């Protein structure tokens, strides 16, 4: 294992740097370097002799503690790579090609290229239904550009999964990600039950407001009457408009101030980050730990708005987690316990943007304004949870169908799920690969269950911090709890053990349900 890590670690570090370069300054050379390093990583993890040795060591009864954990982590990383070299190469090349398209693509609106931020600005502010429809369509154009390649990726990933004994890539991703498919499906059903009725009631009120705003009947409402192209976030008319509070705010300073209040210093990450939009740069947001030795970076495309304030708090939640892992752990477990735990922390921090306490103490909203906003903030927070939960149901169920049959009528399947879970009607006669415009389906496949579990963990973490520290804003004891009980252990124990140890109970949907009922 030490020999394997000695070869893997430098490749991982160089791959992180190449990924950063291709995301911040996309070019054919940068994209090719990233693809070559990704392939080198997969080839190393495909080493059959090393894999056989790891499997044998896992069978030894006297291997315990952190060594046992290291073996489990590296085993799960190696299983998906026990595939023929030519197949691995095809997958890497195609993934790189599709990601490069997403990075450089700009939709066309009225004959001109348009960035994602500009599309969102139209959908949030314009009362012109025609312009909104054209902007919404521009947001989906990348789907048509990549859909065929995403289907090809699904077929190739399935071929790889079956070669190592799994039904399809969906089952492989869960099985090697310490997640149980039956439990996931049961959780989806549970979340559906908790959210269906309150979401339907909230959506009916929203539809009334939107119909009045745009002067149409409720049955004439279309997806472009919503503020977000995928309906991941509630429209301002269905929640509360906080953009005015951030129009002249320094989002970097507010982010630093938030984490300072917890006793967590994110300035080193801020100094290495790339936060503002430009050409040939990814239009999305992410946090990356380059080397597991402190080189943590955030990519954003910040504009002064509630959405980007939420995103900054979210991404720097990931960063605080990465920074906080105990550097004394072996390299293999010097990482978050699981994607769902780091997503839970990030989601928990992003929620603060709608917290009266945070708005008053950190953002400096005057008391009279805060008093006026307070009644709507709770409803806005509830709406955000409902909308995101219903959106997550769409994506997870869709990905299961995508890998179940990549040749199916996915365009129709997507809208069937959108209509069922989000109560958004498909445009009349629409038959386009709108699903493929979601970058995660191509670039971060079978990941959305981590957002779902992350929301559950965020709710459970909030309950825990309320009981133990009285909250989170300007409470160093809350930061200390996060640092010691969540961040420091890294991946030295399974995620479900970490959650139970830190919060006193297994991960449950009950805390999310309690917030929706509040």
Image (tube, grey):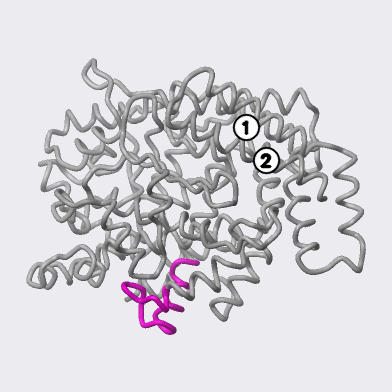
| Quarter of the figure that contains the C terminus | bottom left
Horizontal side of 12 relative to 374 (left or right) equals right
Q: Secondary structure at mark 1?
A: helix
Q: Secondary structure at mark 2?
A: helix
Closest to the observer, 202 or 300: 300
Closest to the observer, 277 or 132: 277
Circle 2 residues within 10 Å: few <14, some 14–19, many ≥20: many
Asked which quadrant contains residue 203, the reply is: bottom left
Closest to the observer, 259 or 304: 259
Horizontal side of 87 relative to 320 (left or right) equals right
Percent position (x, y) of residue 441?
A: 52, 37
Asked which quadrant contains residue 141, the reply is: top left
Magenta stretch prevailing secondary structure: helix
Residue assigned mark 2:
169
Residue shown at 43% from the left, 26% from the top: 25
Q: Contact, CB < 8 Å: mark 2 with mark 1?
A: yes
Q: Is residue 292 above or below residue 439?
A: below
Asked whether 454 falls inside the magenta stretch, the response is no
Q: Earlier in the sequence, mark 2 or mark 1?
A: 1
Between the C-alphas of marks 2 and 1, the distance is 8 Å
Residue assigned mark 1:
154
Image mark for residue 126: none
Q: Look at the image and give the residue range highlighted in magenta.
A: 457-478
Q: Is residue 449 above or below residue 413?
A: below
Percent position (x, y) of residue 311?
A: 35, 51
């Amino acid at each position: 294992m030490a020999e394997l890590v000695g070869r893997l670690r430098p490749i991982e570090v160089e791959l992180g740097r190449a990924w950063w370069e291709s995301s911040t300054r996309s070019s054919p050379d940068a994209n090719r370097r990233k693809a070559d390093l990704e392939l080198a990583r997969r080839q190393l993890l495909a080493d059959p002799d090393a894999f056989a040795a790891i499997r044998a060591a896992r069978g030894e009864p006297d291997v315990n503690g952190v060594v046992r954990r290291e073996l489990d982590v590296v085993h799960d990383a190696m299983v998906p790579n026990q595939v023929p070299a030519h197949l691995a190469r095809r997958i890497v090349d195609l993934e790189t090609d599709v990601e490069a398209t997403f990075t450089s693509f700009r939709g066309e609106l009225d004959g001109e290229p348009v960035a994602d931020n500009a599309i969102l600005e139209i959908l949030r502010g314009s009362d012109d239904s025609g312009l909104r429809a054209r902007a919404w369509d521009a947001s989906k154009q990348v789907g048509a550009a990549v859909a065929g390649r995403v289907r090809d990726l699904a077929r190739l990933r399935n071929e790889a999964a079956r070669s190592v004994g799994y039904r399809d890539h969906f089952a492989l991703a869960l099985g090697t990600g310490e997640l149980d498919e039956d439990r996931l499906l049961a959780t989806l059903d549970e979340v559906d039950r908790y959210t269906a009725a309150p979401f339907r009631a909230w959506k009916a009120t929203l539809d009334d407001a939107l119909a009045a705003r745009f002067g149409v009947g409720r049955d004439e409402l279309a997806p472009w009457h919503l503020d977000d192209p995928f309906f991941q976030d509630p429209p301002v008319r269905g929640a509360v408009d906080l953009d005015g509070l951030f129009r002249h705010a320094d989002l970097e300073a507010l982010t630093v101030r938030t984490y300072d209040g917890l006793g967590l210093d994110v300035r080193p990450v801020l100094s290495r980050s790339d936060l503002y939009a430009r050409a040939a740069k990814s239009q999305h947001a992410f946090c990356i730990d380059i080397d597991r030795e402190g080189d943590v970076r955030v990519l954003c495309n910040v504009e002064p708005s509630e959405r980007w304030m939420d995103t900054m708090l979210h991404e720097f939640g990931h960063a605080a987690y990465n920074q906080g892992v105990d550097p004394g752990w072996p390299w293999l477990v010097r990482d978050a316990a699981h994607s769902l735990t780091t997503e839970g922390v990030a989601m928990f921090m992003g929620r603060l943007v709608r917290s009266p306490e945070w708005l008053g103490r950190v953002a400096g909203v005057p008391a009279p304004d805060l008093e006026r906003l307070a009644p709507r903030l709770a409803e806005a927070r509830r709406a955000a949870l409902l909308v995101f939960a219903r959106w997550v149901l769409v994506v997870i169920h869709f990905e299961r169908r995508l890998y179940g049959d990549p040749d199916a009528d996915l365009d129709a399947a997507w809208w069937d799920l959108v209509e069922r879970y989000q109560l958004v009607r498909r445009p009349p006669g629409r038959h386009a690969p709108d699903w493929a415009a979601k970058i995660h389906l191509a670039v971060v496949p079978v990941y959305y269950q981590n957002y779902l579990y992350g929301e559950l963990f965020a709710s459970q973490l909030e309950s825990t911090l309320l009981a133990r520290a009285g909250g989170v804003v300007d409470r160093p004891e809350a930061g200390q709890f996060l640092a010691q009980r969540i961040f420091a252990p890294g991946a030295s124990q399974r995620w479900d053990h970490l959650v139970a140890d830190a919060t006193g109970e297994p991960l449950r949907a009950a805390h999310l349900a309690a917030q929706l009922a509040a």
